[in-house]
Amino acid sequence: MRRFHISGSAMAVLILALSFCSAAYSAGGRDFAGFYALTDAAQAGQNYTVTFTARVFNYSGAGVTGATLLLRGCPGPGAPCSSFSNIDIGTNRPVQLSTKIAIPAAVYAHWQHGGRPELEIEFTAPDGEKHSERVELMFDHGGAQTHAD
């Protein structure tokens, strides 16, 4: 009997892919999900400066235009530390985000040990209804900035 081994990162990608598929076909599933990476980390006293990069996918079934994505939880719970304005994300299409941020050393350590940044998307639907949804993020061990569209 042959056995095979799946690495931890391959298993994580498989789980995320399956969750994307189920979110796309289930009501109430995650409409926005993606990968993030932290690079170029440099400590300065009690803070770190890092480059936050994310690749966000739209599984909502409708394109989004003029959205704002808010990166929260950096200085503290819920507090925004960066934002990306006027973002368009087509259906089942990704958008790449990247910014340099300063975060407390405790937040950086939390993110390095399994905690995830809070990314939220805010947009107005064509019918005028305002939406605010969390983006489900997974750490990209390969670096989100290395993927091509």
Image: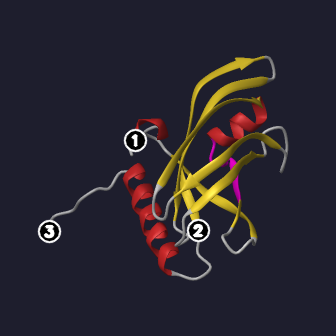
Q: Position of residue 39 (x, y in %)?
A: 56, 29
The structure residue drawn at horizontal position 41% and vertical position 49%, both measured from the top left corner, is 9
In the image, 50: left or right of 128? left
**Label 3 crowd bin: few (<14), some (14–19), many (20+), radius 10 Å:** few
Residue assigned mark 2 = 31
In the image, 51: left or right of 44? left
Residue segment shown in magenta: 113-122
Contact (Cβ within 8 Å) of mark 1 with mark 3: no
Q: Could you tell me the amino acid type at mark 2?
A: Asp
Q: Is 39 above or below relative to 43?
A: below
Q: Could you tell me the amino acid type at mark 1?
A: His
Q: Position of residue 63 (x, y in %)?
A: 54, 64
Mark closer to the chain start, 2 or 1: 2
Q: Position of residue 53 (x, y in %)?
A: 57, 38
Mark closer to the chain start, 1 or 3: 3
The structure residue drawn at horizontal position 74% and vertical position 71%, both measured from the top left corner, is 128
Q: Residue furthest bottom?
A: 27
> Regarding mark 1 in the picture, which secondary structure is present there?
loop
Q: Quadrant of the N terminus?
A: bottom left
Q: CA distance from mark 2 to mark 1?
A: 21 Å
Mark closer to the chain start, 3 or 2: 3
**Label 2 crowd bin: few (<14), some (14–19), many (20+), radius 10 Å:** many
> Regarding mark 2 in the picture, which secondary structure is present there?
loop
The structure residue drawn at horizontal position 69% and vertical position 45%, both measured from the top left corner, is 85
Which mark is nearer the camera, 1 or 3?
1
Which mark is nearer the camera, 3 or 2?
2
